[in-house]
Image: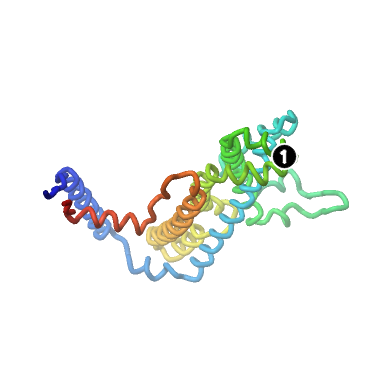
């Protein structure tokens, strides 16, 4: 007896409609007043590649700062100490409640209210010399990200059963040791997916740091576009690199999530190659005896 799969004509119709729309979109852009050769020529321009490196650098550094601050303020938020809990709540409330664009401008113009950074015998210098474009961008993005990461880490910590903490304390482990050895490793399964999404968002949000004169990929392409008159072409160049960055880091996020999902799922999510093989196999008719 042969089992013949049911034909899904609606899927084929939907596929044809989507292909037609995509074809129409490609044709529309091909007929636009865009010099596509300029996009290809400037894609690996030295100035663009330098801006690309700055984008990756500020994104990684800001995310690292945000992750550290997120863990610290999440632990403070969950503390039974009302002072540390209140300070953590105030930090999260302020940096989540104000736009990151405004925060970048505040750090960049900090010298208007504090001309000199004076830490007594430890350090003293002009604020203008300290608050470079990189430092202003790092503080603006990192402190803002720390507020969001604090809530993500807090949710991950609270997802771990309280019995784990009680058992660790019963064995004589301190609170800090329990958090580092027992709670956080289990919370990573919940923390990793939104953290990956936050980093992908950070790559795109880094385009705002051009306001503090930090030359990342968008500012680099915009400068070339202003000089050459190829404004739209250079915006396409920036878009290509942003898509490339997010695609690469999205793959890394997938495998990181897959690693931390071990032990909590009966079967791990299929890899991209496994999904392709599965989709190709559905195009063939299977025979069942």
User: Quarter of the image holding residue 191?
Assistant: top right
Give the residue number, with chain letter if any, for mark 1: 171
- In-image side of 6 versus 252 (left or right): left
Query: What count of labels does the image hold?
Result: 1
- In-image side of 78 versus 9 (left or right): right
Residue 232 percent across, percent down from the top left? 38, 58
Other-residue count near label 1 (Cα within 10 Å), few / some / many at <14 / 14–19 / ≥20: few
Nearer to me, 160 or 59:
160
Residue 34 percent across, percent down from the top left? 31, 61
Residue 206 percent across, percent down from the top left? 53, 52
User: Quarter of the image holding residue 130?
Assistant: bottom right
User: Quarter of the image holding residue 242?
Assistant: bottom left
Judged from the image, the secondary structure of the residue bearing numbered disc 1 is loop
- In-image side of 85 versus 151 (left or right): right
Residue 146 percent across, percent down from the top left? 62, 44
Position of residue 258 relative to residue 86, above or below, is below
Q: How is the image coloured?
A: rainbow
- In-image side of 212 versus 118 (left or right): left
Nearer to me, 74 or 25:
74
**Residue occupying the point 53% across, 47% down:** 192
| Residue 169 seen anywhere in this rendered image of the structure | yes
**Residue occupying the point 72% across, 44% down:** 177
> Which residue sits furthest left?
1
**Residue occupying the point 37% across, 65% down:** 39
Position of residue 146 relative to residue 27, above or below, is above
| Residue 96 seen anywhere in this rendered image of the structure | no
């Amino acid at each position: 007896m042969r089992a013949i799969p049911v034909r899904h004509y609606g899927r084929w119709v939907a596929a044809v409609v989507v292909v037609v729309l995509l074809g129409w979109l490609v044709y529309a852009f091909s007929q636009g007043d865009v010099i596509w050769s300029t996009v290809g020529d400037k894609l690996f321009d030295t100035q663009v590649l330098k801006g690309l490196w700055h984008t990756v650098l500020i994104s990684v550094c800001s995310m690292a700062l945000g992750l550290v601050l997120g863990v610290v303020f999440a632990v403070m938020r969950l503390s039974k100490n009302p002072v540390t809990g209140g300070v953590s709540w105030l930090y999260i409330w302020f940096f989540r409640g104000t736009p990151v664009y405004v925060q970048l401008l505040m750090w960049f113009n900090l010298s208007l209210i504090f001309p000199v950074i004076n830490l007594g015998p430890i350090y003293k210098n002009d604020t203008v010399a300290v608050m470079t474009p990189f430092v202003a961008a790092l503080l603006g993005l990192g402190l803002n990200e720390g507020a969001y990461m604090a809530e993500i880490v807090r949710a991950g910590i609270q997802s771990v059963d309280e019995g784990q903490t009680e058992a660790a304390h019963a064995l004589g482990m301190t609170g800090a040791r329990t958090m580092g050895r027992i709670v956080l490793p289990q919370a990573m399964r919940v923390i990793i997916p939104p953290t990956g999404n936050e980093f992908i968002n950070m790559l795109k949000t880094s385009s705002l740091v051009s306001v503090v004169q930090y030359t990342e990929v968008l500012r680099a392409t915009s400068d070339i576009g202003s000089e050459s008159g190829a404004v739209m072409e250079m915006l396409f160049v920036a878009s290509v690199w942003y898509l490339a960055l997010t695609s690469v880091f999205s793959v890394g996020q997938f495998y990181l999530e897959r690693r931390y999902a071990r032990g909590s799922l009966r079967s791990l999510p299929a890899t991209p190659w496994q999904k392709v093989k599965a989709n190709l196999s559905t195009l063939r008719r299977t025979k069942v005896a």
